[in-house]
Image: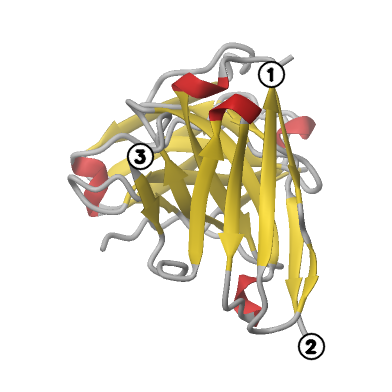
Amino acid sequence: EEQLVESGGGLVKPGGSARLSCAASGFIFGVYSMNWVRQAPGKGLEWVSTISSGSHFTYYADSVKGRFTTSRDNARTSVYLEMNSLRAEDSAVYYCARASDEDYQLMDVWGKGTKVTVSS
Amino acid sequence: SSELTQPPSLSVSPGQTARITCSGDILSTKFAYWYQLKSGQAPVLVIYADNKRPSGIPERFSGSSSGAVATLTISGAQDEDEADFYCCSTDTTGSHRGLFGGGTRLTVL
């Protein structure tokens, strides 16, 4: 079964850092791009970041650029989201989603998400 | 950057056809994708590249696009279709950055 499982969420103080992980199984991880998408409480989905299959390309939403870094380890079939200088508005459920290098918006496998709360 | 505009809500009776629109200039040049999100569950891709249906998605889900408007149609909506639906594309032509619409809450009652 193709599966993505996020971890690393929790309560973080404003200005703090957190690292989310997304572990993939059931498919050849190294040929797919990966996205991070978030949903703040009471809000809609927001695209956060994309990383290409070989890590050659990474893209970020303006709201997180310069603070968040996406990376991946194809040997460990995992993708990561390093979040720094966290703000209250970064509080959200963070999902990882599989896509393709040819079509980053075609997200056909999703994890169930991990919740990040930024609060003092 | 572009925006994708959806109606906040739509209500239909079971068996009726639900049509959810997504408006944005980028849709004139880029594909639309549709995601279904139910509370507590992972999002599900229901339509990609304007009108293609992934395997496992019921035939009652279809998509179309004309000019700057993409439409998700659910023909014969069922109780289990009640969810939030989001359109998605890129934020500008030539960009690889994603963009979601604000979402439409579909109520089937």
* Identity of the residue furthest to the front in this view: A75
Residue that label 2 marks: A120
Q: Would you say A24 lies left or right of A36 here?
A: right
Identify which residue is drawn at 33% across, 60% down.
Answer: B3
**In the structure shown, which secondary structural element does the residue marked by tag 2 occupy?**
loop
Image mark 1: chain: A
Badge 3 amino acid: Ala
Q: Would you say A5 lies left or right of B24 here?
A: right
- State the quadrant of the N terminus of chain B: bottom left
Q: Which percent across, then down, holds residue A78?
A: 63, 35
Q: Quadrant of residue B75?
A: top right
Q: Which percent across, then down, holds residue B34?
A: 49, 36
Identify which residue is drawn at 43% across, 27% down.
Answer: B48
Image mark 3: chain: B
Badge 2 amino acid: Ser
Residue that label 3 marks: B70
Residue that label 1 marks: A2
State whether residue A76 is above or below residue A7. above
Which of A115 and B24 lies nearest the eye of the viewer? A115
Q: Is residue B12 visible?
A: no
- State the quadrant of the C terminus of chain B: top right
